[in-house]
Image (tube, grey):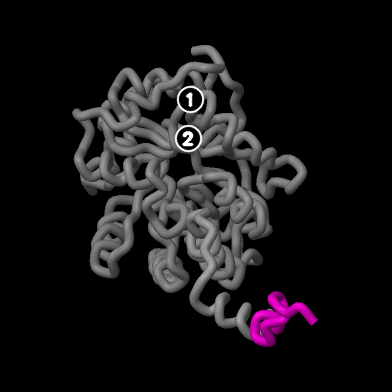
Amino acid sequence: MDGTSKISEKIVPASTSVAAAQQLESWLNEDRAGPYFIAEIGINHNGDIDIAKRMIDLAIDVGCDAVKFQKRTLDVVYTKKFLDSPRESPFGTTQRHQKEGLEFGEREYDLIDAYCRDVGIDWFASAWDIDSQRFLGKYELKYNKIASALLTHIPMLKEVAAERKLTFISTGMCGYSDIDRAVQIFSDADCPFVLMHCVSTYPATEETLNLKMIEELRHRYGCPVGYSGHEVSVSPSVIAAMLGAVAIERHFTLDRAMYGSDQPASLETDALRRLVTILHKIPIVIGDGIKEFGGDERVVAEKLRYWNQMNLSGSGS
């Protein structure tokens, strides 16, 4: 695929689900109140379902559109040697203890699914292996997610693309050839997708974010583009939305001081609320670009243009 290739004709194929097609069309037509906001819980719940529920409640309270988790089959994703190696954590003394402590199983995901349906928020998860992807299938989720690290996992890409669900594809830690191949796989499968510009450092520094890539990805692939951020500040996500990002994904936490490797790259409550509030304001303040003069502005003009009131413009004296 060269730099001018376009795949827009296949972004919303007739064979995909009606819901996914309608959702994507609304983003392409900018027919929504700001970007679709994905609040990434990930593993910041620390293996505690009550913390996960509190985070879901927070996401709803601040106005997020969806919450996202991560799912792994540990013995597929990690080697036995790694899992048996030492690591001190609140869960034990090995890497396995730590990973198992952070991993939700069927019981927890059943509770998450029921809870999210009850409170009315979308949820989905990024699977890190094919077994986990198939496990998530039982919940009939609206969306899939390809994490940046998985972008070169060809069997995984094909597995997800075959489901033909709207998929968010993060593009961190890879080059154009990797993105080209992923886009081709999803296009060949008639699976709708949104590319997510991403810089995969945790936390990412602002000078590395390169948000012009949002427009570059949109131009190169002719598809909707979003932003998945790992910085600790709010402003880059706002700038991404101003550059046309149709979706914003951000990690969040109840407290960055909590245990966990993702906590330092996550937004706390006040920052998350501030960000979502600003994003919801963008379409309001952007307007439609049509110059108008009337209403309150005309009233002000009549007060300030004293020469009109005094009829000075037509006076000969």
Query: Vertical placement of 237 versus 79: above or below?
Result: below
Q: Which residue is mark 2?
A: 195
**Left-right relation of 241 to 128:** right
Q: Which residue is mark 1?
A: 221
Q: Residues within 10 Å of mark 2 (few under 14, many from 20)?
A: many
Q: Are marks 1 and 2 in contact (CB under 8 Å)?
A: yes
Q: Is residue 41 visible?
A: no
Where residue 303 sits, quadrant-wise, is bottom right
What is the x, y in percent for residue 234?
64, 59
Task: Tell me the residue at 43%/67% (across/down).
Answer: 63
In front of the other: 44 or 86? 44
Task: Tell me the residue at 77%/44% (across/down).
Answer: 207
Query: Vertical placement of 160 versus 103: above or below?
Result: above
What is the x, y in percent for residue 67?
41, 57
What is the x, y in percent for residue 70?
43, 47
Residue 99 magenta: no
Comparing marks 1 and 2, which lies closer to the viewer? 1
Looking at the rendering, the stretch of residues picked out in magenta corresponds to: 306-317
Q: Is residue 294 visible?
A: yes
What is the x, y in percent for residue 251?
54, 55
Q: CA distance from mark 1 to mark 2?
A: 9 Å
In front of the other: 148 or 136? 148
Give the dominant element type of the magenta stretch: helix, strand or loop.
loop
